[in-house]
Image (cartoon, helix red, strand yellow):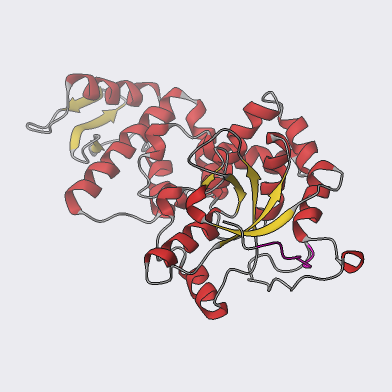
Amino acid sequence: MAKGNRGFGSSLTEGLDDEIDVGSPAPSESIMASRSQSLARIAAGKVVTDRTEWVNPARCRPWRLHNRDLDHLNEESCRDLIDAFLSAKKQRIPAIVRRLKDDPDYDFEIIAGVRRWWTVQWLREHHHPEYEYLVTIQNVSDEEAFRVSDIENRSRKDISDWERAKEYSRALEEFYDSNQSEMAEHLKISRSWLSRLLDVARLPAEIVNAFPDTHGITVRIARDIKPLTSEKRTLDLMVAESRAIVAERDDLGTALPAPEVAKRLIRATVVPAKPAGGEVEVKGAAGKVILRYAHSARSGYTFKVPARSGASATEVLKAIEAILTS
């Protein structure tokens, strides 16, 4: 249940990553434009009437297009908010929500503030049942909600490139008819930056599997890998290396950092120079040597398939084809 309305006098230019206190009620003629109204003006070009209330977090659910990966919300990732809430004895920056209709289980859906919602719930479950969720209620369309959420979260460092890329990818299709230029114009961002970000979400699943945590896949990593996926030969080589990386991770129980994974995938696309005499080893998906070959101008290629390599005939033949066509 709501405890009542409280005015919020912070502007958009104040630090969004810091919890800012909510002032006590002031006369209507002196109430400053709230932070959420500022966000709505930017997103929709108009003032949206809103209310700030304390509500039960159990009556709220994330919007289907929110930009948080719920699997990555835990005590460690939210420790900064937990400590801030405990220090202030309350949440200070309100989340942005919309009121739901005809849903018996929930009253609000969260447009921005999912991490704050998770934190309040965690505190309530860990000896602090007195905590409630501070929200500003907005009346906005889905597309406006996406832009409000983007404005609030664009500068936040605790949102990964992967989370942002997946959010933008869904919005591109749903709100902008897959038109990147239109989306960039609405969000007031460059088309080149939007394209680089979307490349993160467009990496093939077989390549993404090589990374132990999708949050490690940055715009920079995608910039280096994505062009190599457009050619079948290099894509096949990276997929084989990805499988080898996954097999090693499962066998050893340890994971390579994302930059090291990216380096291995890229190196896998570089076919060794054809030797004049010595043999070159080719590793398969399981990380074992599946083929050795040598080449000379007089005798041509000589291929050797090691016994018990575990590779299928198809995998060996693909490796030979890659060598002959390189």
Q: Does the magenta stretch include residue 285?
A: no
Query: What is the x, y in percent for residue 6?
Result: 72, 65
- Residue located 71% across and 62% down the image: 5
201 or 226: nearer the eye?
201
Query: What is the x, y in percent for residue 230?
Result: 51, 27
Q: In this view, does 127 lie above or below 199?
A: below
Query: What is the x, y in percent for residue 298?
Result: 28, 23
160 or 306: nearer the eye?
160
Residue 263 is at least partly visible in this image: no
- Residue located 22% across and 24% down the image: 316
Along the horizontal axis of the image, is 116 left or right of 138? left
Q: Which residue lies furthest to the bottom in this view?
A: 87
Q: Tell me which segment is drawn in magenta.
A: 4-11
Query: What is the x, y in percent for residue 222?
Result: 53, 43
The quadrant in which the C terminus is found is top left
- Residue located 51% across and 55% down the image: 57
- Residue located 38% across and 64% down the image: 125
The quadrant in which the N terminus is found is bottom right
28 or 185: nearer the eye?
28
Magenta part mainly helix, strand or loop? Answer: loop
Along the horizontal axis of the image, is 242 left or right of 107? left
